[in-house]
Image: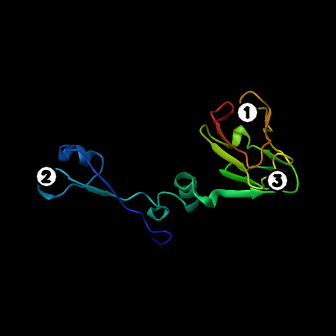
């Protein structure tokens, strides 16, 4: 499907009286029949409920469009999710977004794409006193290493 078009999938509804469906804004077939299947169309930015940026942040966080690659020290923006690090020429320090700029549940994936973290470590640190599993920083010290992090509202955790 082209960009901006909606993907469609079938959603099967249990047999529930029509009145209950109408409570949730679902239009039922004529004559009050129970629904055997209902085609659900997920929201899009074109629906006017979200701006394009809000839609991308809310529904598209796992797409490759959120991949950023760095070969020098960087402080991550709150919108970043997948972070590739080129360690082929030097060590790189990644500073996590501040707690004030993110929500509980924020996730990051940081990966040594350069394949030289054994020599040129990737150092992941915080700038606001938050800890990463009780530490102020962690290092990726193996070639092609990766780490998954999430923020729980009071600190970062590795999973």
Q: Nearer the viewer, residue 105 or 140?
A: 140
> Does residue 19 appear left or right of residue 5 in this picture?
left
Quadrant of the drawing holding the N terminus: bottom left
Residue on which the image places disc 1: 132
> Vertically, is 68 above or below 17?
below
Mark 1 element type: loop
Quarter residue 19 falls in = top left
The earlier-in-sequence mark between 2 and 1 is: 2
Residue name at image x 55 percent, y 56 percent: 60
Residue on which the image places disc 3: 87
Q: Nearer the viewer, residue 128 or 72?
A: 72
Residue name at image x 73 percent, y 44 percent: 97
Residue on which the image places disc 2: 32
Classify mark 3: residues with Cα within 10 Å, few (<14), some (14-19) or many (20+): many
Residue 80 in view, yes or no: no
- Front label number (3 vs 2): 3
């Amino acid at each position: 499907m082209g960009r901006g078009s909606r993907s469609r999938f079938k959603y099967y509804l249990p047999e529930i009286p029509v009145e209950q469906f109408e409570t949730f804004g679902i239009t039922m077939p004529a004559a009050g029949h129970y629904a055997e299947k209902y085609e659900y169309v997920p929201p899009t930015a074109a629906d006017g409920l979200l701006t394009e940026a809000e839609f991308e942040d809310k529904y598209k966080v796992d797409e490759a469009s959120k991949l950023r690659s760095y070969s020098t020290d960087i402080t991550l923006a709150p919108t970043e999710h997948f972070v590739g690090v080129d360690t082929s020429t030097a060590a790189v320090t990644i500073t996590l977004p501040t707690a004030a700029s993110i929500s509980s549940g924020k996730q990051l994936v940081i990966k040594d794409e350069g394949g030289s973290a054994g020599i040129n470590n990737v150092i992941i640190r915080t700038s606001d006193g938050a800890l990463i599993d009780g530490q102020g920083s962690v290092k990726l010290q193996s070639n092609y290493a990766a780490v998954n992090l999430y923020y729980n509202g009071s600190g970062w955790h590795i999973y």
